[in-house]
Amino acid sequence: MGGVTDLHLSGVSKSFGDVAALRDVSLEVADGEFFTLVGPSGCGKTTTLRAIAGFETLDAGDVRFGDREMSGVAPEDRDVGVVFQNYALFPHMTVTENVGYGLRFRETPGGQSREERVGDLLELVDLAGFGERDPDELSGGQRQRVALARALAPGPDVLLLDEPMSALDARLRQSLRTQVKRIQSDLGITTVYVTHDQEEALAVSDRVAVMNDGRVEQVGTPEDVYRSPETRFVAEFLGDNNVFEGEVRDGDVVVAGTAFRVEGADASAGSPAGDPALAPDVSEGSVAFCVRPEHLELGPGSNSFEATVEAVEFLGESFRVHLDWDGREVVLRESERPTTDRVRVGFDPEDAHVIAGGRAGKAVEPSR
Amino acid sequence: MRGADKSRASDLRVTTTRGAGGWLERRALAVLGAATAVVLAVVFYYPVLTVFADAVRVGGEWTPEIVREVITDPFYFGVLAPIFGGDFAQVGDVAANTPLGLFGFTAYQAALSTIASVLLGVPGAYVLSRYDFPGRRTIRSLTILPFVLPSIMVAIGFVAFFGSNGPLNDLLALVGLGPVNLLFTLEAIVVAHAFYNAPLVARVTTAAWESVDARMVETARSLGANPWRAFRDVLAPQLLPAILTGALLTFVFTFMSFPIVLALGGFQLATVEVWIYSLVQQLDYAEAATLAVVETVLSLVLTYAYLRYEARQAGANRAANPPARKRLLPDDPTPTAALERAAVGVYALVVAVVFVGPLVSMVAESLTGPQGFTLQYYEFLVERQATGADFQTKPGLAVRNSLLFGAATLLVALPMGVTISVLTTRGGRGSRLADAAAMAPLAVSGVVVGLGMLRGLVFGVEVGDHRVQIAGVTAIVAAHAVAAYPFVVRNVSPLLSGLDRSMVESARALGATRARALLDVELPLVASGVAAGAAFAFAISIGEFDSTVILATGSSSYTMPVAVERYIGNRTLGPATAMGTVLLGVTSLSFVVIDRLGGRWEA
């Protein structure tokens, strides 16, 4: 214990009544990794976390910590630290008693006394001197840090964070997530973080798993999943995106009669993700590709189409422009407000990313 | 990375060998659950099934004969009896003589009692939820009193109140009316039942009224509804379920009511329950058992209907934003407001007479002899204790027994109730089944449980070559525990299910076993509910009459309520009311404890 802990989920399924919460979920989390599960509410991310913690009995599949098989192992025997969305601090105990609770069941490390251990952890989360307070005398951010200290006190192998920021205001979330990330990387503790906030997921994670409807859509570094979404769902869930569907013809992609040069749409160009096994089959027939709003540019050019300006939102550092292109919704970002109602919009072929074949509006099945 | 930080941080991560709980601790909940199931099976399900078996077995042979005899007997089922028997020619005859039968009369008095309780209770809910006045909270919390007041004591209070020399006739004489003799009349039973159940209706309805969202009424008004329409269209539909809940419960309770009918109606106005008791006294167990079976089936159906209805209503609305309360004495009342206040005043007077009258009468009667004020009845109690023969009922022994049984009941009912609460608040299909099985004792009368225990465990059961027999005292405690633990569950469960489950999960992730998490986290957080449940359990035991009177027959394990009943037989009410006053003292004490601990009973 306390050594290398990598985490494996293979073929995990779980239903609640008729509702399938997890469908054949497999994940690998490396030792010391900050791994984030992100997705819309109801996608199964919290159930996955609860499966790791041992709070749910699985219908199928198994969870391993290193080579320790976890099925049938009670939560109290898993050496996990959990921080819940509402922190779940024990209201009848002081901060010190809360943080020290887990030490009742485990010896403190290095011959430390319980008091020393609790003191160290409160210092770690910048709450030294708050030990005698009751939880209801603390602010939301302070409670969140007490919950973190409490989860870390027994020296867990795995840290599980279930939307720990979602009850806090935006400014506090940013400073706290930086602090959580710093503590995590200092401790080098394997961490699974659940959030519905894609910006948060991209900001703090070593790797991200995007989940939808009980399945894992894609796993990768934040840059990977943002820049090279493998499914339409991932493309649209992470940040603003424009997805176009068309036909491959002579190496171009034809959308609504307009031909576009799209990198990777040419069959000979190979896989955009670099892995031929994962390459979408785009040599013929239909194809979908996406272009981020910041990669669409106003002005004449070869790879372009004409659209009508529907609405303009001022975001501070830029404008978000909503366009209508023959019934298709298109969003772009510009530093200046467009001056005409009809605009010409284009993009660099390298900034377009091929998702996968198929014209269906629904997310494409993940290839694994 | 920061070097110093990093090394200290790695120290923080080093762990440890675990010291988690042993085998028993890990399975503590399962063990407690199994133990509870065994206790329930032995002291509730087995005795009740014994009664059922008595009804369909004669000399070791299964036979429907006794049941058939009972349901085709016009004495029991009135006009329904010939219909059940297929003898339609008899219907006219029976309708002329005994149209209702015993069961019909029982249902009839329960229906009347329910109507009276609703009529007396709903205005109370209106006053409590819509007016603000000093003492409102106290009165609101006093509405739990019926659950704590021993029914035989209430009955004796009404006997004193309605008696020909009682305060009611004195009051009527003051305004030039009377005298009326209400003793051994249906009216007396109905009023006494209202005393018991109107507060229940008021309590349930007040809770609903207080959780009404004032904005709904305001929305209706803004859409053009006048105050009356807004009440009818928006408020009434929200109150009706609560009133119905209270009415259904009242019907179940009054259908099975025993001591009140026994004391105020006697055998002339017997209900099923009283008749069963009289059959047991005559040692006619088979017929008693058959009646008990039919009664139990009926009350189980009613209780099931109630639980289904309650479950449908549960969690319907929790948005508590009630309209502001009115002042009882406005500075400058409009004529309507003045009229309404006058009505409230009349209602308050009725409430005072119905609720305070009997208790005051009981105490007054215990202090009044033929020559006015006297302590002779209390002296009688003391003397009986000092010099009474063994076969006589000694008050001191009754007090001692009551307190002892109360404490023992607490020791059994508390862990049982908490265990059932924990196991049933986990949710899921299994827990709902467990909930129903565990709550069934609420629907089975104490007389039936007492009868079952007497016939089964107290008379003895053959297990293999051994004759298993439990003492009457053990049986009494067991019966009290069966009557009491649902009150523990009802106090603990709502608090427990209100706890965030992540609280327990956090404790478990930190290394606590399930039982440990219960002890360290859940129980401290629901302590007020546990304490209130304990006080209820104790009070229920102190006041329990139905099964005790059967199990204590001919033994010295009688309790205070049984002693009250035994003293009734004498020429004067003095000793019975004196004993009742002692009982009132002990019961008030437990009520004070409940109130201090913030007892809650919302159903």
Image (spheres, coloured by chain):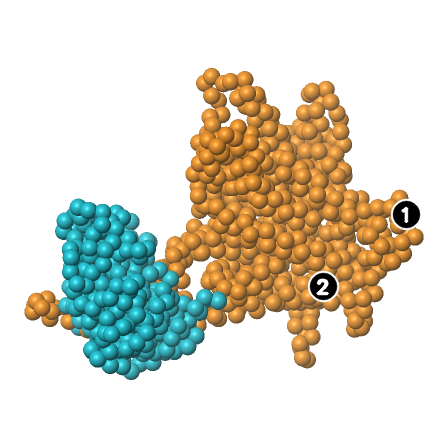
Chain colours: A cyan, B orange
> Mark 1 — on which chain does it sit?
B
Examine the rendered structure and indicate whether residue B512 appears above or below residue B238. Answer: below
Q: In which quarter of the image is residue B121?
A: top right
Label 1 Cα neighbours within 10 Å, binned few <14 / some 14-19 / many ≥20: few
Residue that protrudes farthest toward the left in the picture: B3
Say whether residue A4 is visible: no
* Residue at numbered disc 2: B51
* Residue at numbered disc 1: B92
Examine the rendered structure and indicate whether residue B56 appears above or below residue B530. Answer: below
Q: What residue type is labelled 1?
A: Gly
Residue at coordinates 56% horizontally, 64% vertically from top-left? B433
Q: Residue A300, how many percent across, how many down?
A: 15, 57
| Image side of residue B321 versus residue B192, left or right | left
| Image side of residue A356 versus residue B432, left or right | left
Label 2 secondary element: helix
Label 1 secondary element: helix
Looking at marks 2 and 1 on the same chain, the residue that comes earlier in the sequence is marked by 2
Q: In which quarter of the image is the N terminus of chain A?
A: bottom left
Q: In which quarter of the image is residue A263?
A: bottom left
Q: Quadrant of the C terminus of chain A?
A: bottom left
Q: Which of B551 and B227 is in front in this view?
A: B227
Residue at coordinates 75% horizontally, 25% vertically from top-left? B178
Say whether residue B159 is visible: yes
Q: Residue B193, how many percent across, how many down?
A: 66, 41
Q: How far apart are marks 2 and 1 (CA)?
A: 34 Å
Q: Which amino acid does label 2 sit on?
A: Val
Q: Nearer the viewer, residue B399 or B160?
A: B160
Label 2 Cα neighbours within 10 Å, binned few <14 / some 14-19 / many ≥20: many
Q: Residue B507, how many percent across, how many down?
A: 33, 64
> Mark 2 — on which chain does it sit?
B
Residue at coordinates 38% horizontally, 57% vertically from top-left? B500
Q: In which quarter of the image is residue B97?
A: top right
